[in-house]
């Protein structure tokens, strides 16, 4: 059996666990909003038309932040269409997803839903077809208590208290030629800087996110971040990162190691941001908002014909995840946590139906995809500080990333509760991995609980009829600080130190 060793020591601290690591994303895309979070007439719908089953699963998932309303959608969005009496709202063409947007749900509905779900909103403004004025208008509508035209409009629309939204995205993926209103780095950098400057005149305490590249494979990756940050460095707090992964050509070994790419991506953006900071002789550090990440079978989506007509809420990007997807996904989550010193916000894209951990049937059932579980467990058990864990693990060879450790792991430690949580993935396709936990720095540490997400069929999925097929189960193979991780598995080991 393969053997690996993990040293856990509270002296080696990366950063506090950032609650915003557990953000997700609700875009007006496919069935994320309509028949996802919102479906009046559904048996579980509340007085606002929000599905109660989805709200419950969102809470169980442990979501902290939700980015809204896009995504590519935001780059053509007129927020004013989505406020006021629903019967008077216009339907519009959504160029991003070749759909019709009925505008039944808009800012006020989303904010009501966010309050019910207990999540912090992360609002995006349209810097594709629109600009500074419209961003300011939305900010005034949302955050000014009253006494101005737009704040009074919000009050009239049923929201007497300002929303106090702190985190704002300055557009979305503006480097992508598919983006409505796509721009060069200089064009976007200037617009983002002036939008940020104006928004800060309204409220200097806002936290602003400039668009980084839409992926590390973009031809402008690196140069884009450098040029955008050269324009915006003193005006923004975050640069965004987006990354999606999929198993290609049946190469499961490389797929399970996809967090290697994410690790490199993060290091590159940190280096670029710090280089700009050094040139500007600035002491400020720009953090990373990894506000779109997930497993997404993008090549499958790209090979499909876009809808010819303009449907309302068509099923789009509805990937059904299997066990191996959840293990690769867990690896990405581990990487985000390991980089908590600079990745201080992240959004799993997306929340429901659209490449999502939650799936719904219109009018019917809702269930947890395989990827639901690593996210929910990490959101629940990661607490206190992220520790720099020393890993000693056998390597394996991958076509995409060369030699990669079989074990990928991170640990958190809460001084308050004394609990250590270890999140670990065994990437081996066929061999268990015996993991020894080196806890000398924690006398009396003992394993209180160990669960594993694994199974004989790595392509097993959860369905409406069999929603519990892939679910974490107690790991029976635990002895004296030694836990056996099954092949292709996501594992959570909780230790008490009291
Ligand atoms: O999350 C799906 C899409 O992926 C988003 O709309 C866009 O920002 C990204 O390309």
Image (cartoon, rainbow, N blue to C red):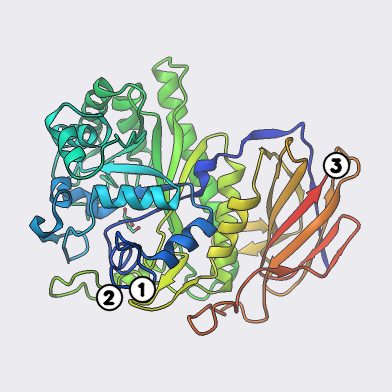
Q: Are marks 2 and 3 in contact (CB under 8 Å)?
A: no
Q: Position of residue 316 (x, y in %)?
A: 30, 70
**Residue at position x 17%, y 72% from top?**
311
Vertically, is 370 above or below 223? below
Q: Position of residue 153 (x, y in %)?
A: 15, 38
Mark 2 crowd level (few <14, some 14–19, many ≥20, 10 Å Cα) = few
Q: Is residue 355 left or right of residue 474?
A: left
Beta carbon at label 2 within 8 Å of ligand 1: no
Q: Nearer the viewer, residue 81 or 426?
A: 81
Mark 1 crowd level (few <14, some 14–19, many ≥20, 10 Å Cα) = few
Q: Are marks 1 and 3 in contact (CB under 8 Å)?
A: no
Identify the image quadrant of the N terminus.
Answer: bottom right
Q: Which residue is mark 1?
A: 300
Beta carbon at label 3 within 8 Å of ligand 1: no
* SS state under label 2: loop
Label 2 – label 3 distance at C-alpha: 55 Å
Q: Nearer the viewer, residue 98 or 299?
A: 98
**Residue at position x 35%, y 53% from top?**
113
Q: Which residue is mark 2?
A: 304
* Badge number at residue 498: 3
Nearest-to-viewer mark from 1 and 3: 3
**Circle nearer the N terminus (1, 3):** 1
């Amino acid at each position: 059996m393969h053997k690996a060793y993990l040293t856990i020591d509270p002296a080696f601290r990366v950063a506090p666990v950032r609650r915003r690591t557990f953000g997700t994303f609700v875009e007006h895309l496919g069935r994320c909003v309509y028949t996802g979070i919102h479906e009046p007439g559904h048996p579980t719908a509340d007085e606002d038309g929000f599905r109660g089953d989805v709200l419950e699963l969102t809470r169980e998932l442990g979501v902290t932040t939700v980015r809204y309303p896009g995504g590519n959608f935001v780059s053509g969005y007129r927020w004013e269409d989505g406020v006021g009496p629903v019967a008077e709202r216009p339907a519009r063409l959504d160029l991003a997803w070749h759909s019709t947007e009925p505008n039944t749900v808009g800012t006020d509905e989303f904010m009501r839903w966010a309050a019910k779900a207990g999540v912090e909103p992360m609002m995006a403004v349209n810097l594709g077809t629109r600009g500074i004025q419209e961003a300011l208008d939305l900010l005034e509508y949302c955050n000014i208590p009253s006494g101005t035209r737009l704040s009074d409009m919000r009050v009239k629309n049923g929201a007497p208290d300002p929303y106090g939204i702190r985190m704002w995205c300055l557009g979305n993926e503006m480097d992508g030629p598919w983006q409505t209103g796509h721009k060069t780095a200089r064009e976007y950098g200037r617009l983002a800087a002036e939008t940020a400057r104006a928004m800060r005149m309204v409220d200097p305490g806002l936290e602003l996110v400039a668009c980084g590249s839409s992926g590390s494979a973009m031809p402008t990756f690196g140069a884009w971040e450098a040029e955008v940050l050269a324009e915006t460095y003193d005006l923004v707090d975050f640069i965004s990162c987006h990354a999606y992964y999929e198993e290609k050509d049946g190469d499961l070994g490389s797929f399970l190691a996809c967090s290697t790419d994410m690790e490199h991506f993060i290091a590159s953006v940190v280096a670029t941001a710090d280089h700009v900071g050094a040139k500007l002789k600035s002491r400020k550090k720009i953090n990373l908002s990894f506000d779109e990440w997930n497993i997404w079978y993008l090549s499958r989506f790209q090979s499909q014909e876009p809808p010819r007509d303009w449907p309302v809420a068509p099923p789009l990007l509805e990937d059904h995840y299997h066990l191996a997807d959840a293990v690769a996904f867990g690896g990405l989550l581990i990487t985000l946590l390991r980089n908590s010193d600079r990745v201080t916000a992240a959004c799993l894209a997306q929340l429901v139906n659209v490449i999502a951990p939650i799936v719904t049937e219109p009018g019917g059932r809702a269930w947890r995809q395989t990827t639901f579980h690593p996210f929910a467990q990490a959101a629940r058990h990661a607490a206190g500080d992220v520790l720099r864990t020393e890993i000693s693990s056998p390597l394996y060879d991958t076509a995409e990333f060369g030699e990669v450790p079989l074990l990928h792991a991170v640990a958190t430690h809460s001084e308050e509760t004394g609990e250590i949580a270890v999140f670990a993935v065994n990437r081996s396709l066929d061999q268990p991995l015996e993991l020894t936990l080196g806890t000398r720095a924690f006398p009396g540490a003992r394993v209180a609980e160990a669960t594993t997400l694994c199974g004989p069929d790595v392509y097993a999925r959860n369905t409406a009829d069999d929603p519990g097929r892939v679910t974490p189960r107690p790991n029976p193979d635990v002895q004296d600080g030694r836990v056996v991780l099954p092949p292709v598995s996501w594992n959570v080991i909780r230790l008490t130190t009291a």
